[in-house]
Amino acid sequence: MADQEINATQKEKEALLNEFLGSKNGDSDNPDGVGEKVEEAVQKEENDPLDTSQPVVIKASTPLPKYGDGGKFIPITIGVTILGMVLGHIKPITRGIPTAAWERYLYIGFGVVFLFFGIKLIVEANTVAGIDENVRIGKLVTIGPYARTRNPQYTGLIFICTALLFFSGNTFMYILPIGYYIFLTILMKRTEEPLLQLRFGKAYLDYCEKTRRIIPIKKR
């Protein structure tokens, strides 16, 4: 009895194998096209190993980009600042440069203050907060200057560019930092912030509630 069961099982295996081979060779006895379906599935997997129909889950250890879309802010801001410094010394725009010596010294003094705090923010972001290392391991940074502003490096750049405009001394150009602030706000809200919210969820939203986007003054 046992031998009969073994023989029956063996015959079923052989029948299935023959069905597959027959379908692969175009056997008309296989109306369902089992072999063709298997081949199509294998070919599809080889050509498209990533199934884009499934959601992609980013693990917490996945590295963050060192410079996200907000990186566009850096060259644009530097370029506009240099252009403003040049235009500020071309007539008739030069009327914005004060003639009184005390005003020039006052502007230079403001420039020194902005330059100091701008450099300080950038250096602290790379040393105290260790932004490069935390970006590499995909960690949300909330210490050091990041406890006061969510974008200390960009804020530091605004401060440095503002300092250069003060050194240049044309009051007409002092409106540019306001433009930098508006531009960075819009850029962050449309690019990096939605990605960080998707990545870190409630932790990032809680962080935003406690920390300002640009101004380096901690919320109460």
Image (cartoon, rainbow, N blue to C red):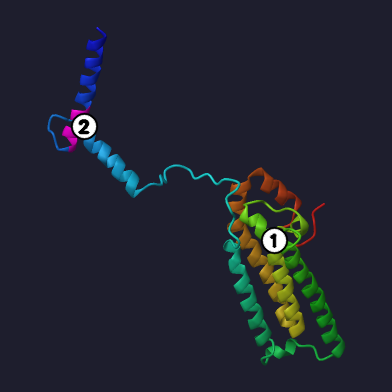
Circle 2 residues within 10 Å: few <14, some 14–19, many ≥20: some
Q: Residue furthest top?
A: 1
- The answer to which of 42 and 175 lies nearer the viewer is 42
- SS for callout 1: loop
User: In the displayed structure, does residue 203 sit left or right of residue 2?
Assistant: right
Q: Position of residue 185 (x, y in %)?
A: 65, 62
Residue 5 occupies quadrant:
top left
Disc number lying in front (1 or 2):
2
Q: Residue at x 60, y 46 (%)?
A: 60
| Quarter of the rendering occupied by the N terminus | top left
Q: Position of residue 57 (x, y in %)?
A: 53, 44
Q: Position of residue 61 (x, y in %)?
A: 60, 48
Indicate which disc, 1 or 2, sits on the residue closer to the N terminus: 2
Q: Is residue 96 above or below residue 80?
A: below
* Span shown in magenta: 17-24
Residue matched to label 1: 151
Q: Residue at x 16, y 33 (%)?
A: 22
Q: Is residue 22 magenta?
A: yes
- SS for callout 2: helix
Look at the magenta stretch and give its main secondary structure. Answer: helix
Circle 1 residues within 10 Å: few <14, some 14–19, many ≥20: many
Residue matched to label 2: 20
